[in-house]
Image (cartoon, rainbow, N blue to C red):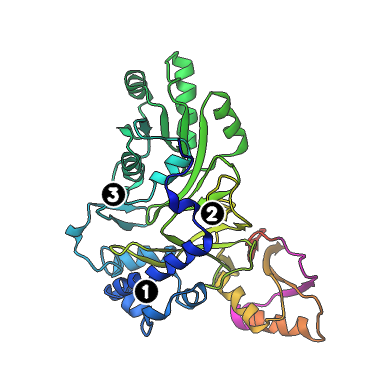
Amino acid sequence: MTDHYDALETREPATREAELFSRLPDVLRKALAAPAYAERLKGTDPASVTSRAALARLPVLRKSELPALHKAVPPFGGFVAGPLGSFGRLFTSPGPIFEPEPVRADPWRGARALFAAGFRPGDVVLNTFSYHLTPGGFIFDASARALGCAVIPAGPGNAEQQFELIEAYRPVGYSGTPDFLKILLDAAANARRDISSIKRALVSGAAFPKSLQDEVKSRGIDAYQAFGTADLGLVAFETAARDGMVVNEDLIMEIVRPGTGDPVAPGDVGEIVVTSLDPQHPWIRLALGDLTAALPGTSPCGRTNMRIKGWMGRADQTTKVKGMFVRPEQIAEIGKRHPELGRLRLVVTRSGESDMMTLRAETAAPSEGLQGELAASLRGVTKLGGNVELVGAGALPNDGKVIADER
């Protein structure tokens, strides 16, 4: 039995890159048919966007902007060109953010993630993600059925009835949050119910710490993690190599400095930005607000796409200082004014009953007057005064944080 979903997963990285960027101009043309993209990408020649450097010059669309945009121009903020009736299902997520489901096989790109977790055609899968209004349940349901699995649409909760279903249908697979898997396992043990048919799991939507991984493994279940969103479906997934997460096919992922659209250096932590090549509902540089870092090389499992470390925190580090918002974009602006610097981090603390700011800046060779120039830039950009501390190159952690609120 093959270890890979198809040949796309093991092609040469340069071949994949060329194929993705050969398709991007046509996707951009379709995006420009939507009024919001036409405004945001005004003056863009789709034929010229055939490389990562060209893509990086386009503006990012922050997921945090979507609730206001969707409210202003319902339901999709003007980012969808086709009529509502051209989609299969219509969902909402907290915000609210409204999400349409494209009409095609595996619309959320999840079959690969399930395959990598050991699911195979003919398996019976207990899907415990919610089917109510939000897309989570349908994402994993459609993905499992695209793979050829039978799905029990259980949703979360109601453990007693779930035990009846498990004992009757004997599913070998579980999809849902890791927390609910633990609840099911504990409740079954207490009630002396047999759910031992479940041998593998694909979990998402919550943290899956090492302690919980070990406990699930000790109960006879091989569980894998996936990273996804209600907008894009499955973005990246764990494989048998257990060495980071492999980015899904048909997606272009960038990792950028928080508050900007500028790609970070290889290996640096930054914000995930995704461009999807879905002509019915394209996303062009959607900044998810989640932090990660790329891993070098290809996965030992043989899949050759970009690998990431997984979820490493939130990129939106906006905070209030003395009643005024300070944003990552402002720290990025200071960096642009002083390109000779390395990483920057604004540390917010309390002194007595007052908020205090200290801008820590990496520099290999501090020039005379640099500290004062940085203090002036900090005040000019944020409209707030603060201290400046110069540190050596590489002294600040590579964790994606540009604002650290330590109050």
Q: Position of residue 53 (x, y in %)?
A: 52, 76
- Quarter holding residue 219: top right
| Separation of residues labelled 1 and 2 (CA atoms) | 24 Å
Is residue 316 among what the camera can see?
no
Drawn side of residue 234 relative to residue 241, left or right: left
- For the point 33% across and 19% down, which residue is it? 164
Q: Earlier in the sequence, mark 1 or mark 3?
A: 1
Which amino acid, mark 2? Thr
The residue wearing badge 1 is 25
Which amino acid, mark 3? Ala
- How crowded pointer 1 is (Cα within 10 Å; few <14, some 14-19, many 20+) is rated as some
Q: Does 240 appear in magenta?
A: no
- How crowded pointer 2 is (Cα within 10 Å; few <14, some 14-19, many 20+) is rated as many
The residue wearing badge 2 is 304
Q: Dot 3 lies on which element? A: loop
Q: Position of residue 352 (x, y in %)?
A: 72, 62
Q: Position of residue 346 (x, y in %)?
A: 67, 68
Q: Which residues are magenta?
A: 380-397
Q: Nearer the viewer, mark 1 or mark 2?
A: 2
Q: Nearer the viewer, mark 2 or mark 3?
A: 2
- For the point 35% across and 43% down, which residue is it? 143
Q: Earlier in the sequence, mark 1 or mark 2?
A: 1
- How crowded pointer 3 is (Cα within 10 Å; few <14, some 14-19, many 20+) is rated as few
The residue wearing badge 3 is 105
| Separation of residues labelled 2 and 3 (CA atoms) | 24 Å
